[in-house]
Image (cartoon, rainbow, N blue to C red):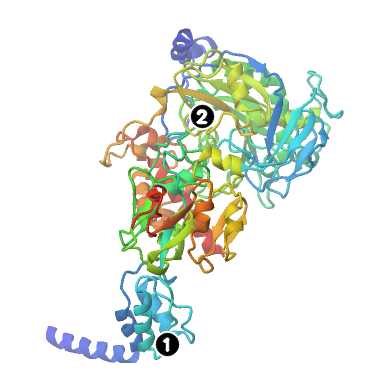
Amino acid sequence: MLSALGVLSAVILYFVAQKFKVYEDPRIDEVEAVLPGANCGGCGYPGCRGFAEAFVNADDISGFFCPVGGNETSVAAAKVVGKSAAEQLPMIAVVRCSGSPNNRPKTANYNGASSCKLATTLFSGDTGCQFGCLGLGDCVAVCAFDAIYIDEKTGLPIVSQDNCTACGACVTACPKGIIELRKKGPKDKRIFVSCINKDKGGVAKKSCSVACIGCGKCVKVCPFDAITLENFLAYIDYDKCKLCRKCVDECPTGSILEINFPPKKEKLEAKSETETA
Amino acid sequence: MRQKRRNAGKSANSFNNSYLKNQIIVLKTFPKGGVHPPESKLSANVPIEVLPLPQQVVIPISQHIGAPATPAVAKGDRVLVGQIIAKSSGFVSANIHSSVSGTVASLDPIIDSTGYKRPAVTITVEGDEWVSEIDRTPDLKKEIALSAEEIIAKVNGAGIVGLGGATFPSHVKLSIPKGKKADVLIINGVECEPYLTSDHRLMLEKANELMIGILLLKKALGVERALIGVENNKPDAIRHLKSTAANYKGIEVHALKVKYPQGGEKQLIKSLINREVPSGALPIEVGTVVHNVGTAFAVYEAVQKNKPLIERVVTVTGKNLAKKGNFMVRIGTPISNLIEAAGGIPKDNAKVVNGGPMMGKALSSTEAPVTKGTSGVILFPVKESLRPVMQPACIRCGKCISACPMGLEPYLLIRLSQRKMTERMEEDRILDCMECGSCSFVCPANLPLLDYIRLGKGDVSAMIRARKK
């Protein structure tokens, strides 16, 4: 009796499954197999499956890029759908703040919950700079690749060059908007303004010795018009920057950092304490 | 101070003996949750003192909940006391008036109590000239000549906001939405926060003005009955208000059991009239409107004396402060002036809190101005200002659940908040939390419960906003 019921149910289930079968493009599975499977959301889609579905159904795949897999993955995924992918240069997250306790003295003590997001809603920060890093590690908590950690000495986040996939999770997690995705650069060399202080020069300098004071010297010295000055803050356009390092020498506060350059002959740069490989 | 403390301990007994002889009464309170932190009402016996004018005032253009006001003056303009310097920019917004006479020095943003830059009007004080319409005589003006609409319009014009600390524009509360009806007005004289005594002093010293203010609010709302709730640790205020209220129609004074956070709107409604405001709803849903005693006094001044909200009572207190007191301060006065008047910052001071010790926030700079919502400034010595050492884990003792006046489960919410389980948090009514801090206060592991609940509330609100888009 029981086995007859079982057989009957199986037959019913078979026909129901046939009747309500949902056709799914087999290429979605193929694309998903190519993707890293980190489900980080760095591409802007809800996980790798979401990316694969959108990728297969899209007419134009130029807007699709998996930052974790990089160009190899893009090419492989494009092959599945029979299209070609445009090459993109690798990116990396950079922390635009050099306000270690030496450079930026503490003016208050915070002993609430360890969350940057909460601390920003309560007050401007435990130093004189209302733009700078709080060092409570929201970026560390969201990183799925162990690519960012807080340096005990400086209290600032450090991005690991090897692990960072430029998924952008830390960029959205930082309530102060300090972290930015920039081009990794040829041989990983890059130059950026390590400050987002929009105060007038005097105010900025008072709160932090390595703040960008908006003097505009770098703008004048740059031969490629790569630097713009807005709200007393310089910004280097990484597409225009040719890594000539003129601005680095010119900056009076040392707020422009150069990463992975060979040391200059006369002096070893001590200020790159904020970022190491 | 020692004497004060002794009195505080006896207060309940002496009150029963002298005032309600041989009557056994059970004081009203709200049933769910609540805590009883040390009262520390150190400045309760100090009369309100008028603080001398500062040299410069900084008046932020957003001192209320809602849209910031739009500046209506330019640099170099001469302004008088009571002149509008920023106009209300919507229904939920409030006018800002100059609290001094002088010249507008700048419209640049200033650093406020949180350390962020906020737009404000800086005025250099010259003399003390008032706008001519303001009646500055101390005479009591009893006759109520205006209609309900006119009263609401005057309250709106005077820039009155809830002076209990939430700073919600008062005219919005007075304009009852269509289809709703209020039958009772509740006046909040609870002052459940420890240390603060500004409302207490106001009730003692300005009781008649307060009563007329309540009559005005009653007329504006069209209600017959007004209840004043005062906690039983202020027996002198209760006695004084009761004898004063006897001369006015339809005002009752109720003594309430001392329990924090009774000053919360929903808790006070439950205590006084035993009605429960539904989750996410306003008190008008259960036919009542709650106003603070400070607001009622401001309404009296605005309607009867044409005086906009340009000053308020601020308690300046702290265990080691030389001259604790209650000061009538012009809005925009730097908090450092207040501390100076109270004897200066004590040696071992570590923290200056704006507001009460339970819900107030630490100041990042004492140069921040007094705003409409500043009810007190408390100076804490090092010993009292640090958080106790946090224990590693929650043992689910459930103390936070029994302390939560809103019936939430803080131990659960903090876990959901840490794990970013936003939808679960919404289901568990995290938005009902009014951030009273009772959970953090009772937690034996000293976990930062409220911190994470605040964070979770932010996440849930963001999710709801995103859903509406």
Q: Is residue B22 visible?
A: no
Dot 2: what SS? strand
Residue A267 at what x, y percent from top left? 40, 49
Comparing A245 with B271, the one in front is A245
Q: CA distance from mark 2 to mark 1?
A: 62 Å
Comparing A61 with A1, the one in front is A61
Q: Which mark is residue B353?
A: 2
Tell me the crowding category of disc 1: few under 14, some 14 to 19, or many 20 or more residues within 10 angstroms, Cα based: some
Quadrant housing the N terminus of chain A: bottom left
Which residue is situated farthest in the front direction here?
A266
Dot 1: what SS? loop
Tell me the crowding category of disc 2: few under 14, some 14 to 19, or many 20 or more residues within 10 angstroms, Cα based: many
Residue B87 at what x, y percent from top left? 76, 44
Q: Could you say which quadrant of the image residue B50 lies in?
A: top right
Q: Could you say which quadrant of the image residue B46 lies in?
A: top right
Q: Is residue B80 visible?
A: yes
Decide: is A43 above or below A82.
Answer: above
Comparing B219 with B298, the one in front is B298
Q: Could you say which quadrant of the image residue A39 lies in?
A: bottom left
Residue B462 at what x, y percent from top left? 50, 56
Q: Which mark is residue A84?
A: 1
Q: Which mark is residue B170?
A: none
Residue A227 at what x, y percent from top left? 57, 60
> Is residue B375 shown left or right of residue B244?
left
Total count of labels:
2
> Is residue B387 shown left or right of residue B141?
left
Three-letter amino acid code of the residue under disc 2: Val
Which residue is situated farthest in the top direction here?
B3
Give the label, 2 or 1, closer to the camera. 1
Decide: is B188 above or below B427.
Answer: above
Decide: is A34 above or below B343.
Answer: below
> Residue placed at 40% from the left, 65% from the top?
A166
